[in-house]
Amino acid sequence: DLKKKKDLYFSVNRISKYGNTPLLLKALTLLCISVVAYFYILISEYYLLLQLSYLLFGTSWVVMGMNLGHDAAHHCLTGNRKADNTIFEIIFGLQGISGYLWKLRHNNSHHPFPNIYAYDSDLEITNLFFLNPNQRKKRIHYYQHLSAPVLYMFISLPWIFHTDFMPFRKKKL
């Protein structure tokens, strides 16, 4: 049984299945960056500082969503399901993403069928990235190692305006 193997691995290696000190430090660092950036957004009198603050604030929240929010959605951040659900809903909600729909899509299509074209809805997020061999390769895909870090800062926009509405157009998630 896969669950028993997983539990044995963590037990034998004396590793917690939940967040550890480096994860806590990452969470606190991202939270501090976002708080400081938000503070400078409010008080900045200089255009360049304002733009840098917006960039840091947005990037820190995207990273929080993709790291901390994802771990919390799988109940492996704190070890407390209620706390993890609350953290997940707050992080995704503040980004304008429906946590409920994301969890539904992610757990019902990505986990049973990871990286399988036409079944894993995470592969349908955008055509800007080459994510599977069934996809038609475009010129931009040859440079995705350069463009992806920048484009991922904007990945929540399609989720807010497109992906959250996909379940209403399809019979299957």
Image (tube, rainbow, N blue to C red):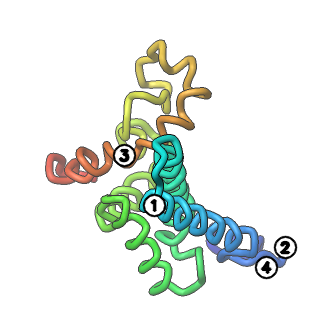
Q: Which residue is drawn at 56% across and 37% down?
A: 149
Q: Mark 3 points at which residue?
A: 121
Label 1 or label 2, whichever lies nearer to me, is 1
Which amino acid lies under the numbered mark 1 shown in the image of this protein? Ile
Estimate how packed mark 4 is, as few (under 14), some (14 to 19) or many (20 or more) residues with alpha carbons within 10 Å: few
Task: Evaluate whether residue 114 shows in this view.
Answer: no
Which residue, given by chain and number where applicable, does mark 2 sit on? Answer: 13
Label 1, label 3: how far apart the Cα atoms are? 41 Å
| Label 1 or label 2, whichever comes before in sequence order | 2
Between disc 1 and disc 3, the foreground one is 1
Q: Is residue 52 left or right of residue 121?
A: right
Secondary structure beneath label 4: helix
Q: Position of residue 42 (x, y in %)?
A: 42, 61
Label 1 neighbour load within 10 Å: few <14, some 14-19, many 20+: few
Q: Mark 4 and mark 2 in contact (Cβ < 8 Å)?
A: yes
User: Upstream in the sequence, badge 1 or badge 4?
Assistant: 4
Residue 153: horizontal and vertical position, in percent? 47, 43
For the residues labelled 1 and 4, say whether their Cβ atoms are less than 8 Å apart: no
Name the residue beneath numbered marker 4: 11
Considering depth in this image, is 95 or 1 the residue closer to the camera?
95
Front label number (3 vs 4): 3
The percent coordinates of residue 65 (x first, y second) are 48, 60
Disc number placed over residue 43 in the picture, else none: 1
Q: What element carries label 2?
A: loop
- Marks 3/4: CA distance? 33 Å
